[in-house]
Image: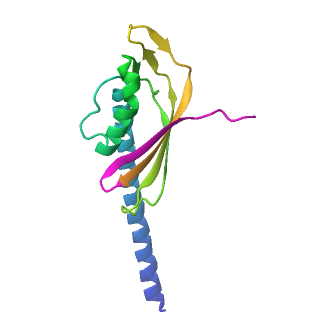
Amino acid sequence: MTPALSALLRGALRLDRGADHAQREQCLEAIRDCVERFAYALSMMIAGHDAPAGAIDPLLLARMQGALRPFLARGDVMRPDFGAFGDLRVEGALLDAGEPVLAVLEFDDRCVREAADGSLVPARLRRLRLTMRVELDPVTVIDCVVAEVLPRSA
């Protein structure tokens, strides 16, 4: 390989890496926005309201409504407070729109339950984890598991 061809290929690789980096950053921003919309929609649902239109995949929305139905049927609702900050981790091939990625959001849950009689029942402070599968084209949460983050034993 000639020095000129070698230099040309190195330059092309650098440009590709730069373009890939920019595309990854755009993808991460879109995922972050999607997760934020999803968390907001979840908070609306546990408060007894409808999720904003288009915020949640219709199949996932139906499953979530079914899971919340017994709680809401008692007349109880939550006053959502997921805290001001959360930790978001995204795993997967951001440049492969054909495969979903995993987005994991952890936050401090400070919600208060409002009973049907209007009384407020503070919940114990806990850390929650939303583990979501996110499609990349379009960026949409297609599955979610909510779990409590257990404290690490010493």
Where is residue 152 shown, x and y percent of the image?
68, 35
Q: Answer with left or right where residue 99 lies relative to residue 59.
A: right
Q: Position of residue 30 (x, y in %)?
A: 35, 48
In percent of width and height, residue 119 lies at: 43, 7
Specify the quadrant that holds the C terminus: top right
Instruction: Indicate whether residue 90 is drawn in magenta.
Output: no
Q: Nearer the viewer, residue 9 or 79?
A: 79
Q: Is residue 130 above or below residue 133?
A: above
* Near-viewer residue (47 or 60): 60
Residue displayed at 53% across by 36% down:
147
User: Which residue is outermost to the bottom?
Assistant: 1
Residue range of the region highlighted in magenta in the rendering? 136-154
Establish if 120 lies above or below 17. Answer: above
Q: Is residue 43 visible?
A: no
Position of residue 29 in the picture relative to residue 106 (left or right): left
Q: Give the residue drawn at x 47%, y 32%.
A: 85
Q: Nearer the viewer, residue 16 or 38?
A: 38
In the picture, measured across the screen, residue 148 lies left or right of residue 55, that is right
The question of residue 149 being in magenta is answered with yes
The image quadrant that residue 132 belongs to is top left
Q: Is 14 drawn above or below residue 97 in the view shown?
A: below
| Total numbered labels placed on residues in the image | 0
Q: Residue furthest right?
A: 154
Quick check: can you spot residue 25? yes
Residue at left offset 41%, top offset 82% = 8
Q: How is the image coloured?
A: rainbow
Tell me residue 58's x, y (percent): 29, 43
